[in-house]
Structure formats: C-alpha cells, structure tokens
Amino acid sequence: MSKFQELYRELENLTNSTNTSCKKFTQLLKDLGFQIENCNSGGHKIAKHPAIHFTEYPDYNCGHNPGENIKRPYIKKLYKFVKQHKDTIEEYLS
C-alpha cells in the first residue's frame, strides 16, 4: 500500500470519528502535502495544496485550542476535496 493510500484511508476513517484532535488532523493534512495557513479569526485555517490551483481552498476551524477536537463536517469537507483531487495529490506525493 502506498503512502498516499495509507493517508487517504486514515482520512476516510476520520470522517466517522468523533474524537479527532485538531493537531492530529492538521498533521494528517500536512502529510498529504497541504500547506496550512492561519486565518485572521480564532482557530480558522485554510488548507492549500501546491499541486491544486484554486482561488478558494477548503477551510476548517480548530477553535482556540490546538488540542480541541475538530468537528466532523470539517473533516468530511476536506475528505471530499482530497477524494475529488485524489490522482493529483497521489502523483504529488510519489
């Protein structure tokens, strides 16, 4: 199993999880090649991927504490984005 497939499966498993810390989720996105940018408000972050050129990238919210659990809708949104660009991200990680 390739590195991408392992990470993709882990992200997919998180879509059903209720106890995923923002720190763990952010690290998984970084492992997939995303660059995480802080927004100007609270714990909002934008996940940009260098292999995918968009004007609008998916975002998520960590609250005010990096150890706080991330809400499932954010995980699902990022999973959908990765699924949509699966081939491009996998090629980038190769």
Image: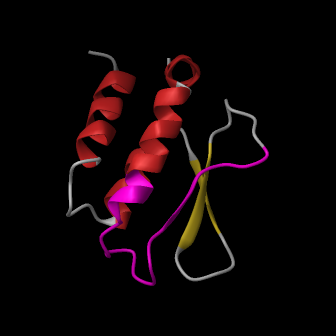
- In the displayed structure, 93 sits above or below 79; it is above
Q: Main SS of the magenta segment? A: loop
The N terminus sits in image quarter: top left
Number of numbered callouts drawn: 0
Residues 81 and 64: in front is 81
Place of residue 53 in the rendered image (x, y in percent of width and height, measured from the top left): 75, 35
Residues 73 and 9: in front is 73
Colouring scheme, one of rainbow, by chain, secondary structure, one colour:
secondary structure
The residue lying furthest to the right in this view is 55
Does 82 sit left or right of 8 as displayed? right
- In the displayed structure, 17 sits above or below 34; it is below
Residue located 63% across and 81% down the image: 41
Place of residue 42 in the rendered image (x, y in percent of width and height, measured from the top left): 56, 83
- In the displayed structure, 55 sits above or below 8; it is below
Place of residue 22 in the rendered image (x, y in percent of width and height, measured from the top left): 37, 65
- In the displayed structure, 73 sits above or below 49; it is below
Q: Looking at the image, can residue 32 be seen?
A: no
| Magenta stretch, residue numbers | 55-75
The residue lying furthest to the front in this view is 73
Residue located 66% across and 49% down the image: 57
Residue located 53% across and 17% down the image: 87
Residue located 49% across and 21% down the image: 90
Magenta residue check for 49: no
Q: Looking at the image, can residue 13 be seen?
A: yes
Place of residue 40 in the rendered image (x, y in percent of width and height, measured from the top left): 69, 78
